[in-house]
Image: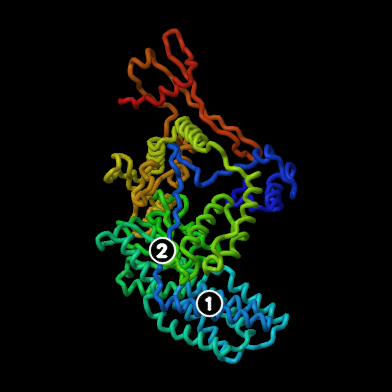
Amino acid sequence: MFLTATPHNGYTESFTSLLELLDDQRFARNIMPEEKQLSQVMIRRLKSEITDKDGQLIYAQRKLEALPVDYTPKEREIHHKLQAFCTSREAAGEEVGGVTGASFVNQLLRKRLFSSPAAFASTLEKHVATLESGGNGKAQTDLSERILLKAIQRAEEDYANDADVEVAQQEAVEEATRHSRSLSAEERILLNELRHWSQLAMNQIDSKAKALLLWIDKHLKTDQLWNGKRVILFTEYRTTLDWLHQILATQDLGGDRLMILHGGMDHDDREQVKAAFQAAADVSPVRILLATDAASEGIDLQNHCNYLIHLEIPYNPNVMEQRNGRIDRHGQREKEVLIWHPVDAREDDEVVGGHKKDILRALRKLDSMRADMGSVNPVIAPQMSGLIEGTLRDLDTRLADAKIVHARRFVRAEKDLANRVAKLHERLVETRQDFHLSPEHILKAVETGLVLAEKPALRPLTMAGVAPGSVFELPPLGGAWERCREGLEHPFTGKTRPVTFDHEVAKGRDDLVLIHLNHRLVQMCLRLLRAEVWAQEDNKRMHRVTVRVLPDDRLDAPAVVVVSRLVITGGNHHRLHEELTVSGGYLREQGFKREDGVTRLQAWLDEAQPHQT
């Protein structure tokens, strides 16, 4: 079985290669199969169409919003001066053959200025330091070009540690600057103005930070008091994280309300942050999580958060999706996931970066394409910089649209999914009934197993909003059985949680632990019960025969029911099939009379009560 989010990326060879791996007798690389052949081995279901048994959508709907930033005249001037500086340097780079290095440095400066004054200042200082050291102006050779390209590749790689990201980018800036020509008089004036502003601005609250503070007051507070909502603030740069962390702390938004998550954190510290953010709002006080991209991959943060803000719009769509996926995933309890992107509040000729409407339109188009294809990064990524910086008004999706049309011919979503889910749920309910997989039966099996093992019994507890007899305390069991208590501690508070055997009781709660069929406690109890089936008479602690009673109107004579266990094994005694069967009948004066209705026999067993001696 293959599971993938991108079954068809628009390339025939990639898709057919997957099919060939799946079944090389039926499929071959570069040969597209017929639709009938493909439908026999492939199922595609879209998140946006998957429902529960009642036809309600399981996954939240994603909504993309703008975070308007009202830049000051000085900030707008700085953005325009940086653009003028970059244009001049790239023109100079063309003259000396160093356009690759100049383009990299310029784009990094623009990206970091969009992120924060602090991030911009750190990269600008490295650029200036190399220029002033006299290390620039070296002749471009094939070897130096390869060294530069290698440094740029390292700077664009994914790292688990934020420090490694900063080092790689600084080394690439230094290498690129070495092969750029000296500054012209006009460029030196622009650079000095940029440098002077950045040194002042990195210690102040800029317009984007002010917009963020207003957003927090509006969405995370009610009448100036913290409500139960939470938000994740994502940034690409550790420098921006530290800068914003300081701002929030000075605005009385720090303390236990604010936590940070960055690449390079110790695993235990990372898990503590995750536990605090995933705990209920009345248990954990944290409301704001500041995180870098290096820390975002593979972590669940959706339990009690459906707000996310990009502190800068990533140039890489995959990075944006990686961030969004922290809360837009299975287990999200809200109906909507809201994601904000910082854009200029103005829409005239003085706009900083792309126009608000252009960016949101493009991002929504990108989101729609992602939902259809799974990934559009190779097609769209090169255009993102132009969109964000304002040199493009819209994404050119013609190539991507053609790939989607091509992929749809072979990768089609399953039709009438709601009815399919409803039928599957009916089958699940029937299976539970056939195998008696009710919470009561699992509880009885555990209670019996604990008695056989001579362990303390479960202690019933009462909890608000939960029916009596549904929640229990699992006492210390000792020995090998003590491992059954693993996972009872609450990840955040550390308190030992009660247990339940009912999925409906445990649903949506983290103050209870569900004891399911595959839980160690159930498995150990079932092993004891199975062992009793084969135990010798002199070592048996359970009887094979029991007496049950039914109302007189259900039986007109004593009856006997035999439960048999059928096991089919293959080679090496591997269990191929196992089932329980029932048979029985009436004990009359004339003799035994068989009852042919299996469902009636099962009904007797289900309705019978223990005989009171």
The x and y percentages for residue 223 are 24, 60
Dot 2 lies on which element? strand
Q: Which residue is drawn at 49% across and 37% down?
A: 418
Q: Which of marks 2 and 1 is nearer the N terminus?
A: 2
Mark 2: few/some/many CA within 10 Å (<14, 14-19, 20+):
many
Q: Residue at x 65, y 38 (%)?
A: 40
Q: Which residue is drawn at 31% across and 57% down?
A: 228
Label 2 vs label 1, nearer the camera: 1
* Closer to us: 595 or 226: 226
Q: In this view, does 167 lie to the left or right of 546?
A: right
Question: Real-space Cα distance between discs 2 and 1?
Answer: 23 Å
Give the colouring mode of the picture. rainbow
Viewer can see residue 533: no
The x and y percentages for residue 209 are 38, 71
Dot 1 lies on which element? helix
In this rendering, the answer to whether 346 lies above or below 486 is below
Q: What residue type is labelled 2?
A: Leu
Q: Which amino acid does label 1 sit on?
A: Gln
- Give yes or no for contact between labels 2 and 1 (Cβ–Cβ under 8 Å): no
- Residue 287 numbered tag: none
Mark 1: few/some/many CA within 10 Å (<14, 14-19, 20+):
some
The x and y percentages for residue 166 are 52, 76
Viewer can see residue 416: yes
* Closer to us: 565 or 187: 187
In this rendering, the answer to whether 269 lies above or below 302 is below
Which residue is the site of mark 1? 83
The quadrant of the picture occupied by the C terminus is: top left
Looking at the rendered structure, the number of numbered marks drawn on it comes to: 2
Which residue is the site of mark 2? 67
The quadrant of the picture occupied by the N terminus is: top right
Residue found at the far front of this picture: 349
In this rendering, the answer to whether 420 lies above or below 141 is above
